[in-house]
Amino acid sequence: MSEAITIRRLNAEQAQACAPALAEVLIDCVEGGASVSFMLPISRETALAFWHAVAQDVGRGERILLAAVDAQQRIVGTAQLVTAQPENQPHRADVAKVLVHRAARGHGVGLRLMLAIDETAREAGKTVLVLDTVTGGAAERLYARAGWERVGAVPNYALMPDGTFCGTTFYHKQLASN
């Protein structure tokens, strides 16, 4: 499947138009137990509102949105690069909401998104990337394969979609500038 996946950078208009498909990926991930800032039950309206807000951030140049598209032109994954940072951190960006639909997992979609994030960050002049993820989750293996370095973990940092506490592990990656 990974050969049939294309990673696309969406502009604000494309992000707005793709909001329903992006919402489906978000809902699937949350319903599958992903701790990505949303609680169960997650409504379609909540998911759509999130993606419309992301599209506005893209339009303001504060965020870059990537979508993984399969051979049937369905969005099966997404990742974001938050480029709006404080004045003293123009070289840094946060990676957010790396999501892969459960039906597309195990086929390299997440790794393709992470490699595209690296290239996109370089193109944006970013050399330090940070992210966080659920401690002990499958995403930790993905980030290790993608060359990220574990910084540390905070117990009981967030809630899983079902309301139970989970720890959060922080990672960083230093990119060589082009």
Image (cartoon, rainbow, N blue to C red):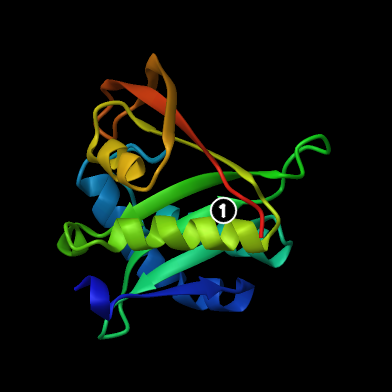
Q: Is residue 49 visible?
A: no
Q: Nearer the viewer, residue 175 or 98?
A: 175
- Which residue was labeled with disc 1? 81
Q: Quadrant of residue 28?
A: bottom left
Split into 4 quadrants, where in the image is the C terminus?
bottom right
Give the residue furthest to the bottom: 72
Specify whether 97 is left or right of 104: right
x and y percent of residue 14 in the render? Answer: 54, 78
> Relative to 103, is 166 above or below?
above
Residue under the image location 62 percent in, 58 percent down: 122
Residue lying at the far right in this picture: please name it. 87
Is residue 77 visible in the rendered structure shown here?
Answer: yes
Labels in figure, total: 1
Kind of residue indicated by mark 1: Leu
The answer to whether 74 appears left or right of 113 in the picture is left
Q: Quadrant of residue 163?
A: top left
Q: Is 106 above or below relative to 96?
A: below
x then y, percent, for residue 32? 19, 46
Position of residue 93 relative to residue 11, above or below, is: above
What residue appears at the point 25 percent right and 77 percent down from the top-left corner? 3
The location of residue 160, given as percent across then percent down, is 29, 30
Kind of element beneath mark 1: strand
Horizontally, residue 56 falls left or right of residue 174, namely right
Picture coordinates of residue 167, whole percent (x, y): 34, 20
Residue beneath the point at 75% across and 37% down: 89
Quadrant in which the N terminus is drawn: bottom left
137 horizontally vs 47: left or right: left
Tell me the crowding category of disc 1: few under 14, some 14 to 19, or many 20 or more residues within 10 angstroms, Cα based.
many
Residue depicted at x 61% and y 50%: 176
